[in-house]
Amino acid sequence: MFYDITLEVIHDYASPANSGRHALRLMPATIPHEQTLLAGELSFLPEPSERRNRTDFFGNAVTDIAYRTPHRELCFKLVARIERTATPEAFDISPPLKSLAREIADIQSLRPVEPVHFLAASPRLRLDPAFAVYARERVDADMSAIAAVETIGKALYKDMRFDADATTVDTPALEAFERRHGVCQDFSHIMIACLRSIGVPAGYVSGFLRTSPPEGQPRLEGADAMHAWVRAWCGVEIGWIEYDPTNALRVGQDQIVVARGRDYGDAAPVKGVLRTAGGQTTDHKVDVIPR
Amino acid sequence: MSLDETAISGDVGRELLNSYRPFPGVSDELLDPAGRVRPVWRPFIDHLSSLTPEEIGNRFARGNQYLNDAGVYFRHYGQNDAKEREWPLSHIPVIISEDDWEVISEGLIQRAGLLEQLVADLYGPNKMVSEGYLPANLIARSPEWQRPLVGVTPQSGNFLHFLAFEIGRGPDGTWWVLSDRAQAPSGAGFALENRVATGRVFNEYFARANVHRLAGFFRRFRNHLVELRGETDSRVSILTPGPMNDTYFEHAYIARYLGFMLLEGEDLTVQNGRLMVRTVAGLKPVSVLWRRLDAAWSDPLELEESSRIGTAGLVQAVRDGSITMVNALGTGILETRALLAFLPRISKRLLGESLKLPNVATWWCGEPATRDYVKDHAESMMFSPALSTALPFSSAQTDFIGRDFEKFHKGILETWIDNKSSDLVGQEAVTLSTTPAYQEGGLVPRPMSLRVFLARTADGWEVMAGGFARIGRTEDASAIAMQEGGSAADVWIVGGRKPVRETLLHQIESPYFKSQAGTLPARAADNLFWLGRYVERAEGAVRLLRAYHARLQETADPEAPLVTMTADYLEDIGVAPDAPVPQSLCDILQSAVTSASKVRDRFSVDGWLALNDLAQTASGVKLALHENADVPRAMGLLLRKITGFSGLVHENMYRFTGWRFLSLGRALERAHAMTDLLSVFTSPKAPEGSLELLLEVGDSAMSMSRRYAVSLSQATVLDLLAMDTKNPRAVLYQLTEMKDHIAVLPGAAEFGHLSHLARSILQIHTSLAIATPQTLTPETLADLRDRIADLSGELTDTYIR
């Protein structure tokens, strides 16, 4: 499947920002057997004083930009064409939950892809016992790892209410979990915490989701959004699988990966540090158009 | 073990040691197992015994006085506050023989080399993990393993430049490493202050005792840091989390002692991968940063994103190799308690030798076999979080002995260990040796641990010959932390011969301090400027309050025109005379203290103490004064304290750029306040007596009678208080001061052109200089006042932002 993706982020500052530095994880990655970036361009208005690209620990493409002159508005624009080829595995040959720990203990490597990075609490994600209680009520030690992932994903989809206004980017996962509401970031964080609590290594994926307009209505321009979902490690044989708890489905051709990490903090599309006196408003426009 | 009194020569020490009873099964620094005073202590005990309790008391007081005068404090975090506390000096030094020290030094130098290799591996090839010496699952879960630094080799080639080790002596007399401090070790500066204080307590004795000196260690480390710069136009600086940190005193102290800039994260910025400090002369490169800030907080963009005390882009500067961090970001992983479990094997693998100084036996509960061993010995083990980087005993909540846990949670210890597994270590419960502390006329044994400092120098690792001893408050070793009421003692390494006086030796080899370009960080300039303004503002307020209360006393009529006008004026400038000492006046002084506290490295200790004394006096007077008290007299007292402080600072401060900003703040505030005062009290509506009040507030009554034969008139008052160039109270005098300071600030005149600020002050100065008392109407004065106020903003725009 081919996609043309455009994304526009506009920051409006109440009073001019004197300087700023931002790290952007917006460019979809080329991942063998999953997706290929055919063309992509990231542009800025105003033109930054500094700009450079790097790859972070988890292999994500990062563009760092810096401003040294006062600016009242800042706009990022991404245009990319992607070929997406990933399909979920058909057969569940993952080990039972109870033998994951031994497989993990045998790992003698700290490469970014290793599950050891995705087991403990991470900077944005504390493992409150509430997550363990919820997960243990739904899975048992003899269940296969993939079955456990899907069971918890489906349970959260059923128990949680999608609410675009209930949480912010900084709402702790536990709070969203207790109130059983939130957006894709909350769904993903909660599912990650549940999985880690039962010994399944789990991480965060940010990316794009192809959306279909309601039956009989035209597609609205700019109405798509950036999305987030979960990846889980299901044993040496299978490795990582990806699951979208907000929509209760295995990740396939409809999702395009941008960045991966332990939690939102590792994969955040835009991180920034500003010197400004006032607040700011942000506006997003996303289009994911299949070709 | 009991004290064998006959073992002590003659009567020496009998009184002192009457109640000195080491504990069974614990080794003691002072007495050998047979109860005899160890040879290395004997001369000191002889000396101490020759002093009467009164003499000892006086000497201790002398040490305390020194610490007090030097302003040594640490911040104590209480339930609801974080107060500055007096430094808890235990006056009796810990004395260690050269032979013992040799063993410690050798062991710690080996360990420093091992840690360097280990951390290079953890951020490099990761052989210790791939070969099975370290569990991947342990390192990966540590918040101190900083992923953004993986694969980054330090520009200098070394991760570690300054280390500390917490060590203790076990029951069999051998030394054990309790904890490795590799992130941003503190205590070296406190060790220096302990040394000075203890040296004063035992001054004649210290002079003849063969105690190793500390200065050479710092000098060589300083030279090492200066060498690390590479380019010569760049700077070495010290990075502090700021005044609220528990050891901020030490950061400021070391910065002053070594002559380095003390910076906070917001002083720094990164430009094209280079770390720069914002100074009043623009951005200047910093190439070596001795950080006292934990790595996680140093860059909100790539590390802990909630940090408000970091510098965005710092990690990029590190990756670009433009900055040497001391120690490298990420070295905090070495403090992880669970690593102690693996270091003995890693030493054999990396160094090909066993650890010369063992560390506390430690078992990580993340592996089933080890966990079973821990369960079998759980009763006597100490448990703590595997990833903890805190000192042992620093938290009773997280560190405890198995049997204490059993007392409260009977029968579930094993289950608890299973549940915690990877997050838990068991450690052999440590017994610390005891050392003498002085209590009520005698010596008593108290548990102690030593902090030993190692620095990289041109010749490799060097051990500071001395250190910092923590002394327990009680007999219980767990009360050794200063936050728990423990105290600190100097450490004397004593040998048979007089140590070489290195200072002289090295003066021949190289200059004492290699010079480095000094510049004033913009934030420091800002704080000095406002310190100048606040102190002057307080002085102006006190003068007016005094005048007001004097009028009130004279007339005894709160409705008298001049009294009400003065009251209204005071209210307008924010110090309404609603109490003998208005709260607003205390607030101004507190603002001055706050500004000063942020630049303590640039500020004399005397000045700091005088300022605090002033703020405390104001609060004290506020409480003590009742309604009908003699307020003018109290104001006179405050005034003398303020001018005492100003005199102290202005007479003693080196005429660097920082002094200019302080002076500018004072001059601007005074010029502004006087112009404002004149614009109101020379108005045609001003009641009778206004001119006298102006003269009194302007402290110029005497000059008046000397300079002008004629009687008091509006013209003469304006001449004296606005236009006089010799009267320090006059506006023009202060504008001249400002003009002179601004003329020599960086960038004041470039390519023959005056800066915007220099032009502004020149315009204001000129317009007043060519005025006459007749043209100085209340309106023109108000205009002049506003233009002076605008200068403050211009100054900030030019130098601070």
Image (cartoon, coloured by chain):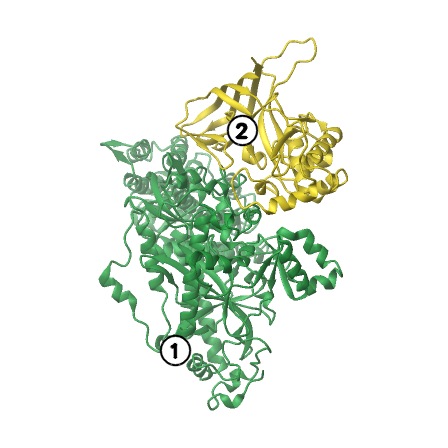
Chain colours: A yellow, B green
- Locate residue B153, reporting x and y percent: 40, 44
Q: Which of B35 and B209 is in front in this view?
A: B35
Q: Which percent across, then down, holds residue B45?
A: 46, 81
Residue B393 to residue A120: above or below: below
Q: Mark 1 lies on which chain?
A: B
Q: Which residue is drawn at 39% across and 73% down?
A: B98
Question: Of residues B398 and B598, which is closer to you in this image?
Answer: B398
Image position of B53 with respect to B648: above or below: below
Report the side of B627 relative to B590 (left or right).
right
Which of the image's four quarters has the C terminus of chain B? Answer: top left
Residue A269: numbered disc: 2
* Helix, strand or loop at mark 1: helix
Q: Position of residue B27 (x, y in %)?
A: 54, 76
Q: Vertically, is B202 above or below B189?
A: below
Name which residue lies at 68% across and 32% down. A92
Element type at marker 2? Answer: loop
Residue named by callout 1: B205
